[in-house]
Amino acid sequence: MCGIVGYIGNREAYPIIINGLKRLEYRGYDSAGIALYDGKTIQLCKTKGKVADLEANVEKEICKTGNLGIGHTRWATHGVPNDVNSHPHYSNSGDLVIIHNGIIENYTSIKKELINRGYTFSSDTDTEVLVNLIEDVKKKENVKLGKAVQIALNQVVGAYAIAIFDKNKPDEIVVAKLGSPLAIGIGDDEFFIASDASPFIEFTNNAIYLEDEEMAIIRKGRDIEIRKIKDDSIVAPYVQELQLNLEQIEKGGYDYFMLKEIYEQPSVIKDTFRGRLLADKGIIRLGGLEDYIEKFINADRIIIVACGTSWHAGLVAEYIFEDWARIPVEVEYASEFRYRNPVITEKDVVIAISQSGETADTLAAIKLAKEKGAFVYGICNVVGSTISRATHSGTYTHAGPEIGVASTKAFTTQITVLTMIALKLARVKGTISQSDYMLHLRELDIIPSKVAKALKKNDEIEEIAKVFKDATNFLYLGRGYNFPVALEGALKLKEISYIHAEGYPAAEMKHGPIALIDEQMPIVVIAVNSNHYDKVVSNIQEIKSRKGIIIAVVTEGDTVVRELADYIMEVPNTPETLSPLVTTIPLQLLSYHIALMLDRNVDQPRNLAKAVTVE
Ligand code: G6P
């Protein structure tokens, strides 16, 4: 994980690096550091804590001058988050300075070898090993920095996005990538380096995304030189025009990104189906799918791989695909899938779901599926991300940047895309009736207004949050399409409030969790109109007889559950198949308010990171 930023040009690097790091803090925020170079002196400052702590230390410790700079915000992998383990790291001579996102897996053996050769280490990090390996190669082979990086990286096993400079070359930064993302912004006589394009969006719209196993030698006033790490061969740069704008990555009047992103859902769901769903005409058109419909329809099964919230969206898809398109679906944690020696054949279609498009386990699962001959379809939010490029085809969710670490709008837009795919396949396959198909198209078309209506209950939900903010355990129950929503609701609460919460299929409650129920236990039950409504009502009765406290998500106008529940959160009536898009809203708001009342950092919960680029 970790976020990296770099600058080389004619401006002062400091503000660019610091603001860039703030935008990348979603990638990790347990320590931060910066190195600035004015051609004479390297100013280096690093600290445990957030970028704001770094800023405060910079004021006290170093000058903020230099037209070259690199910065890092860290999610610790090797070594506890403290000042010493923070990046950047110097090489032993003090000439080379590096920042690194990723893991060097064989660092122990390299470190031993370097210690034998007289190198010393002050941190526990794999990164300090890498910078000294590069230094060692540079000296031994008597080569320049770029060549030394290329040779050294061929000895390394693992994942990395690095930026490194040499004190003796004040006009040059060398970057390289394998596994972790790296974008280079191209300005007028200046270059920006970052884990994604957000740090440089106000300076340039032109960027190069390095591919895996590529490196770039970036020199002020010169053209970028991209090379293959393996054989040092030259690669022609591919400059992309960015679609991001500054407004999208700012809070826009909200106190937190999470709240902004929750409230954006009506508009981003619309963006997700804009131009793709023509409800009146009965048309769904997904560019990435059109050419591959036969592959889906003839597939033996669809395997969905994902992590975290994206995995929950996959679970919702399992219900929709099987229900409408009658294609067997398996939903897998990417991390388990890849290590299980799974049975995959050319007749399988794999759908990889990832907001960031960078999750290491999902990426590894994709590679495995491709090796075994499966067709791999991606559903990503971040345009140009590694997963979006690693898949055979796919659909973007177009939710705009999601910066709050707890995923919200990514979830609902992923479900929107998956719903469109399922409807399209069912239509082509003839497994859905014309009337059902049209009904769902129209219902999907008006979902944004229903989500907006669900958001209007915010104040009532805040009141409920006040009652339960000190609870130590929560149970979330749902059935059918709303079972994954129960999992997602529990995950949201855990992530941002640190209250223990478990999601369960409502009927499974009897096989264990029922033992936890007493008069202290809040139980969130999703009890909206559905085929299972009566069964859910029975589950609520079972909880009541054990004195559990019921907070029910109900359909507007519901009377039965209203009578039984202690608290209710209403959502507009929707077909059960689309209900996750609205039932998830009160659960997001409930978690948000509880976390806020507990004084948690809702955008940057402890120990988490948004893009998990380590396995
Ligand atoms: C991290 C994030 C989650 C996210 C998961 C999968 O754990 O904190 O919000 O759901 O990664 O990420 P992806 O980008 O692949 O959807």
Image (cartoon, rainbow, N blue to C red):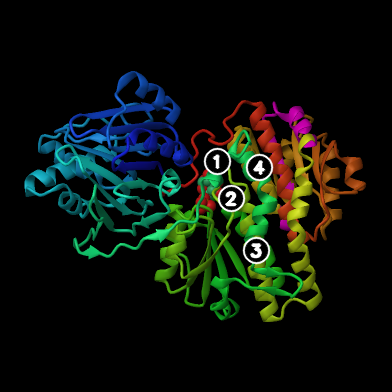
Residue 14 on the magenta span: no
Compared with residue 472, is residue 2 higher up or lower down, i.e. above or below? below
Q: Which corner quadrant of the image does residue 165 belong to?
A: top left
Secondary structure at numbered mark 4: helix
Who comes first in sequence, dot 2 or dot 1? 1
Label 2 or label 1, whichever lies nearer to me, is 1
Q: CA distance from mark 2 to mark 3?
A: 23 Å
Who comes first in sequence, dot 2 or dot 3? 3
**What amino acid does circle 2 point to?**
Thr
- The reply to whether dot 4 and dot 1 touch (C-beta < 8 Å) is no
Q: CA distance from mark 2 to mark 1?
A: 23 Å
**What amino acid does circle 4 point to?**
Ala
Residue tagged by mark 3? 274
Some atom of ligand 1 lies within 8 Å of the CB belonging to the residue at label 2:
yes
Identify the magenta region: 460-482
Q: CA distance from mark 4 to mark 3?
A: 31 Å
Q: CA distance from mark 1 to mark 3?
A: 23 Å
Q: Position of residue 358 (x, y in %)?
A: 45, 53
Q: CA distance from mark 4 to mark 2?
A: 11 Å
Which residue is rendered at x = 20% and y = 64% of the image? 233
Residue tagged by mark 1? 250
Secondary structure at numbered mark 1: loop
Residue tagged by mark 4? 490
Neighbour tally class for label 1: few under 14, some 14-19, many 20 plus, Cα within 10 Å:
some
Who comes first in sequence, dot 4 or dot 1? 1
**In front here: 419 or 235?**
235
**What amino acid does circle 1 point to?**
Glu
Label 4 or label 1, whichever lies nearer to me, is 1
Residue tagged by mark 2? 309
- The reply to whether dot 1 and dot 3 touch (C-beta < 8 Å) is no
